Amino acid sequence: MARPARRPGRQAQVTGLLLALSLACASVGTPPGGPPDKEPPKIVHVKPESGAVVPNLSGDAVIQFDEVIEEMAGGGGSGGGGGLDRLVLLSPVAGAVKVNWHRSSVSIKPKEGWKRRVYRLEILPGFQDLRNNRTDSTKRVLFSTGPEIGHARIGGIALKWIDQTVLQRALIEAVPLPDSVGYLTMADSGGQFNLQNLQPGRYIVYATADENNDRRRGLREAYDSVVVTLDSSSNVALFTFPHDTVPPRPRTATSIDSVSIRLEFSQALNPTASLDTTHVHVLALPDSTPVPIDKILTQRQFDSLATAARQKAESAAAVARDTTRRPPPPPPPPPQAAPTQPARGAALRAQARPSVDTALVRQLLAQRPIPSDKLVITLVHALKHEARYVVRVTGATNLTGKKGDGDVGFTVPKPAAPDSTRRTPSRPPQPPPTSKPPS
């Protein structure tokens, strides 16, 4: 009697499935020996195309690529398209924008539907293919659902007023008055921006430090705005800063030296509403005895005076030294090796970055006094060691005009004891003088 055939075991079935899977994967992979794909995905076309007038647009705007793109490129997002909603700017739009992935294309549509407007679609760098090749350029498409496309422009630069530098990748919004939604763009790494194809009229232009990357001006994010009457072209400078709605308060006070106190506030103060001795008082505890104040300086003013005094002392010490003993000349620098391929690539990328006119940035920042959250109080008489004091402030004004009062105390530390472990070496005993024999 023939034995019945045994069913293949579980391990044999798993082995067969893995073999079939490996053969299937091998059949769709890149042929061995072929050159690796290092080219980023390219945009084949955009619908509607730039300059088109589509009065009855009802479907989606579509970006078509020449290959499949990564669905989650750009990080996590909130627009329904993974992270792709962070790589497109559609404006002017009130509310959210739906961004959906379709393998080699991306569809875009405002949740409010298409209105009778001129739309600006900005396709940002960051789209990736399945081999992580990333786009590094921006493409702009303008199309209309009825109105004529304009020919005016607003350009400019976004700056950090408190930090005294440019605001990289600032969110720029130009709202045509009296509307409430505007045209969006992103400033480059030098803080510069250029919004073209606008209709003449009055605009309010915002620059925002979009820290959470949600394409909106948050209540806690630094921003600035300016009203522009646009004819054909206009340039603006925006000085962003946090718009605090609570008044400033003194936070800490510390003694810098025997006659100087550093006072730190909870936020930057308005530099045009400086504090004087009618607003700042130093009291010695426990009797609240007033301590006479000599000057009230910003931290930058105090540092500048201290640097000037140190340089003057060093210059005087250098003059007093023996100038005849000059140090030997420094050795010649070692020969530099030829740059490697990665170094050449980094240099080329640096050349491709937008240039920043540092002289212009300095000139613009010099137009406004610098805000500071620190003041230095210099006293007429020296502070007492291990004594306690309080600094009382009234009428401190922040950058939005809010005024605040407050007290803050501090204790002068005990002077540090001298280091007894490092003693000056004693002189060795001198031998007694020898007596000269009589002649």
Image (tube, rainbow, N blue to C red):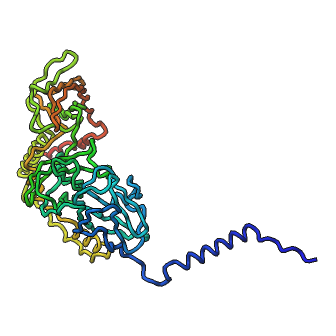
Q: Residue furthest right?
A: 1
Q: In this rendering, does residue 23 appear at all?
A: yes
Q: Residue furthest top?
A: 287
Q: Is residue 22 above or below residue 141?
A: below
Q: Quadrant of residue 114?
A: bottom left
Q: Residue furthest front?
A: 56
Percent from the top left, x then y, of residue 379? Answer: 11, 29
Q: Is residue 235 above or below residue 300?
A: below
Q: Quadrant of residue 340?
A: bottom left
Out of 197 and 408, give the one closest to the viewer: 197
Q: In this rendering, does residue 439 appear at all?
A: no
Q: Quadrant of the N terminus?
A: bottom right
Residue depicted at x 58% and y 76%: 24
Out of 313 and 148, give the one closest to the viewer: 148
Q: Is residue 390 above or below residue 356?
A: above
Percent from the top left, x then y, of residue 436? Answer: 14, 46
Horizontal relation, residue 389 to residue 11: left or right: left
Percent from the top left, x then y, of residue 310? Answer: 11, 45
Residue depicted at x 21% and y 58%: 187
Horizontal relation, residue 327 to residue 123: left or right: left
Count all numbered tags in the image, as a single digit: 0
Out of 313 and 183, give the one closest to the viewer: 183
Residue depicted at x 55% and y 79%: 27
Percent from the top left, x then y, of residue 38? Answer: 38, 76
